[in-house]
Image (cartoon, rainbow, N blue to C red):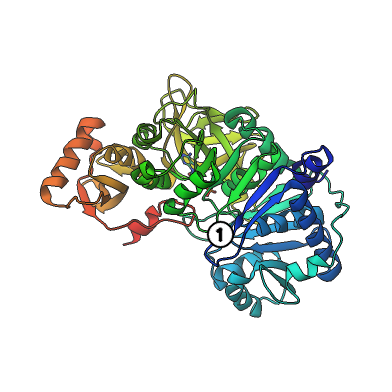
Amino acid sequence: LNCADELLDRWVREGHGAHPCVIGGGGSDGGAEIRWTYAELQAQANRIAHVLVEDLGVVSGNRVLLRGANTPQMAACWFAVMKVGAIAVATMPLLRAKELGQVIDKAEVTHALCDAALAEELERARASHPVLTRVCLFRSQAADGLEARAERRPAVFENVDTASDDCALIAFTSGTTGQPKGTMHFHRDVLAICRCWPRHCLKATADDVFVGSPPLAFTFGLGGLLLFPLSVGATAVLLEKASPEALLPAIAKHRATVCFTAPTSYRAMAAQAKAHDLSALRKCVSAGEALPAATRQLWKDTTGLEMIDGIGATEMLHIFISHTEATAKAGATGVPVPGYRARVVDDQGRELPRGSVGKLAVQGPTGCRYLADERQLKYVQDGWNLTGDAYLVDADGYFVYQARTDDMIISGGYNIAGPEVESALLAHAAVAECAVIGVPDEERGQLVKAFVVLRPGRSGDDALVKSLQDFVKATIAPYKYPRAIEFRASLPRTETGKLQRFRLREQ
Ligand code: 3UK
């Protein structure tokens, strides 16, 4: 079993080879836009597979680092790595030499395919990590570049017959704190995620056109922008720069029907959506962070569309609690995706009654396998994956996100979930973005503090502080209101759109 066969080759075999598959490139570098059919992506992946084996000496089980923005070439490289039975180690484009070095060490990377535009940091990392022996650049004019080599190779390749439990990829967590952790996923895991959430919650078809912002190096992006569209024979639009400002015109231009991005990006898009033709859009998927009820409503008011929220994790490969547009419930993440089981447990792993806040525990066809890491024993207990999230199950059986367990605030004896306060603040007309943390306080242990980015034209004066505090007190239990409010021009976020609350705490 090789996941490239089911996701790519079979479409060509079954007469779907002429259907548009991946569109992209032609970005800021002024290059021409690439539009590859399924047959063309397959041919390109096959040629690169030959280069991997015959020029670069890759054997199955080797770890191949992939470094590039979201482009068709990156997609071809990913499938080539699958085809030769090697293990893809995709890295975030913004990583620096030091972080790349950690990835190379931890994943024992021997080979790399790297976008020429991003070669510099990798070369610096390589200088101090000789285990990485071969680097080949793509999107390069060089005579020894990947394209030049691939051109000379045949367009057919016989996939290595990997076992279903051979490792297909090592994904590194985006790391909101501390050291990056590598998680292993098998060929069968790649196929399992295509059969679970997309089939039950997304319900896409070959006519769909997928677009979005998460990097292919982030499993949210790998699934949403490559695996899921290809699993149904649809088209994937890959954007090199996917800021909210770039996403809107791309949706219009490609008449995209499915969009994957983070809540903060939907909020930014909502502010400008009216100026773009979003009429083809039908599915708007949000993940990476909790989706506040106010953001769901804002997007509905702007576009008429109900969003689909889903919680996923690098450790689980993709989304495991979610819903359809028809079963959306404001403020709740949803119910376990068919194939997965989830429950809320106490510190001893005992299931808690509905309404009680505890640790989220998940089980399903995918799960956490850290590369040699003592944290495995913390993440998986009694066969349940503990994602590090605090949740409750409401009266209807919906899972309602509270906070990262380390982000829960204890103030004056109360447990307060920062994201609940953030959701309340986001419904205020003056608030564009916000982050709520606990700061040390002699009297209360911790004090609820909000960092607020205002909408244009608003000024952060004492009257607004009072207005925001009153607004929160009128929306949720008054003891949760932010006793301190600081106005900021922006908030620290990861490349994947996650708030870095730990950075605010450090300051
Ligand atoms: C948080 C959410 C509330 C949560 C991811 C979809 O985010 C992804 O993976 P990461 O490893 O982070 C995992 C953590 O992020 N989170 C993600 N989605 C939600 N919290 N509501 C949500 N909808 O703390 C989780 O433990 O970066 C998301 C698919 C694949 C992914 N890797």
Q: Which amino acid does label 1 sit on?
A: Pro
Looking at the image, is 501 positioned above or below residue 362? Answer: below
What residue lies at 72% left-to-right and 63% top-to-bottom? Answer: 64
Point out residue 105 in the picture as x, y percentages from the top left corner.
66, 68
Residue corresponding to mark 1: 180
Residue 154: x percent and y percent?
A: 87, 60
Q: Which of 176 and 122 is in front in this view?
A: 122
The residue that appears at 64% across and 79% down in the rendered structure is 128
Query: Is the CB of the residue bearing disc 1 within 8 angstroms of ligand 1?
Result: no
Q: Which part of the image, by quadrant, shows the C terminus?
A: bottom left
Q: Can residue 350 be seen in this view?
A: no
Residue nearest the viewer, comparing 371 with 308: 308
Residue 310 to residue 30: above or below? above
Most extreme residue toward the bottom is 127
**Residue at screen point 26% across, 57% down:** 488
Q: In which quarter of the image is residue 318?
A: top right
